[in-house]
Image (spheres, grey):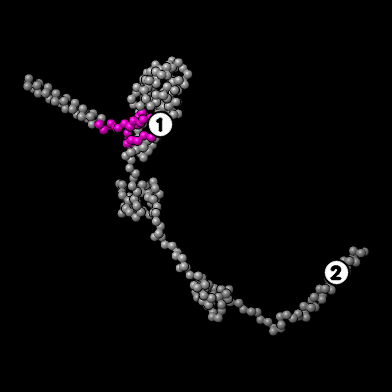
């Protein structure tokens, strides 16, 4: 019975030790993975270089004078020199991270908020009797004077496929059957499908008309040669020989029969009709005039 108790105690001890080792090792691994480098800027304005994902921070000394000026402008009973000296003792004020891009920015509003929180955490007596008013003035002063531009030193621009090459497939079957770029692929840089590329630099392989090669119309169609399509059958014609293109296109026309008299002679019935019309007109005019006089 005693042996069984000793064995159970030993087994429990080994189990607890193993669990403690696993937890400790996991914590160490997690800490090593989550830790990231911190890029410390020399000032709260300008450009800072760092790796993508690195934390961007400034020292309290870099904003000491801005804190002093902001506390002084608060207009309250604040010991601004004490607030400035207390913030100068802060070694690091985190502002943000370097984005996963070629560059980015941390505006003055974000820096002012971070400095405000850092001054508040110092619990300085320099904030006076109205600490919130003094902190607001400090934040406004820092936000109007600071601003950082971040540059990722380890950023690598994505490579674009050259025209005529096969685009790499990223999962799925791709746009074409053999992995090539489809004809309707967006060729502008930054296309929605990720396969855009710049237009070619040289257009010398495009077919163009060379000077001196074009033939003048007079040479291609001489005056005594038929026009293009003249020998083809025309709609509405019967193909009679001896007629020109204009007559064939207009149809068949026949002249009306005449009695052989010259076309310019005036016939006797026409003369009689004119004389009768003149007489009737004169009688009507005479009757109208006599009625007006009466």
Residue picked out by circle 1: 45
| Numbered range of the magenta stretch | 32-58
Considering depth in this image, is 85 or 161 the residue closer to the camera? 85
The answer to whether any part of residue 273 appears in the image is: yes
State the residue at coordinates (9%, 21%): 6
Q: Which mark is residue 284?
A: 2
In the picture provided, is 65 more to the left or to the right than 241? Answer: left
Q: Residue most toward the right?
A: 294
Callout 1 environment at 10 Å: few (<14), some (14 to 19), or many (20+)?
A: some
Within the magenta stretch, is there residue 46? yes
Within the magenta stretch, is there residue 284? no
Q: CA distance from mark 2 to mark 1?
A: 114 Å
In the picture provided, is 137 more to the left or to the right than 182? Answer: right
Quick check: 291 above or below 186? below
Q: Residue most toward the bottom?
A: 260
Q: Secondary structure at mark 1?
A: strand
| Quadrant assignment for the N terminus | top left
């Amino acid at each position: 019975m005693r042996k069984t108790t000793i064995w159970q105690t030993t087994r429990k001890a080994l189990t607890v030790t193993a669990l403690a080792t696993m937890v400790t090792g996991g914590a160490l691994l997690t800490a090593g993975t989550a830790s990231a480098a911190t890029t410390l800027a020399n000032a709260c304005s300008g450009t800072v270089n760092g790796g993508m994902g690195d934390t961007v921070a400034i020292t309290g000394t870099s904003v000491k004078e801005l804190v002093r000026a902001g506390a002084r402008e608060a207009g309250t009973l604040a010991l601004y020199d004490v607030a400035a000296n207390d913030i100068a003792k802060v070694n690091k004020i985190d502002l943000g991270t370097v984005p996963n891009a070629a560059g980015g920015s941390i505006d003055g509003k974000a820096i002012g908020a971070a400095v405000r929180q850092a001054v508040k955490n110092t619990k300085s007596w320099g904030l006076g009797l109205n600490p919130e008013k003094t902190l607001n003035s400090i934040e406004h002063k820092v936000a109007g004077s600071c601003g950082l531009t971040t540059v990722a030193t380890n950023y690598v621009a994505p490579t674009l496929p050259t025209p005529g090459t096969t685009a790499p497939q990223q999962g799925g079957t791709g746009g074409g059957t053999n992995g090539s770029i489809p004809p309707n692929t967006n060729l502008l840089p930054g296309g929605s499908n990720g396969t855009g590329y710049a237009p070619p630099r040289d257009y010398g392989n495009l077919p163009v008309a060379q000077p001196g090669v074009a033939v003048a119309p007079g040479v291609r169609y001489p005056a005594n040669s038929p026009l293009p399509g003249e020998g083809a059958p025309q709609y509405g014609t019967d193909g009679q020989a001896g007629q020109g293109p204009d007559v064939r296109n207009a149809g068949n026309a026949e002249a009306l029969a005449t009695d052989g008299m010259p076309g310019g002679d005036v016939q006797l019935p026409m003369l009689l009709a004119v004389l009768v019309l003149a007489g009737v007109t004169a009688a009507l005019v005479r009757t109208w005039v006599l009625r007006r006089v009466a």
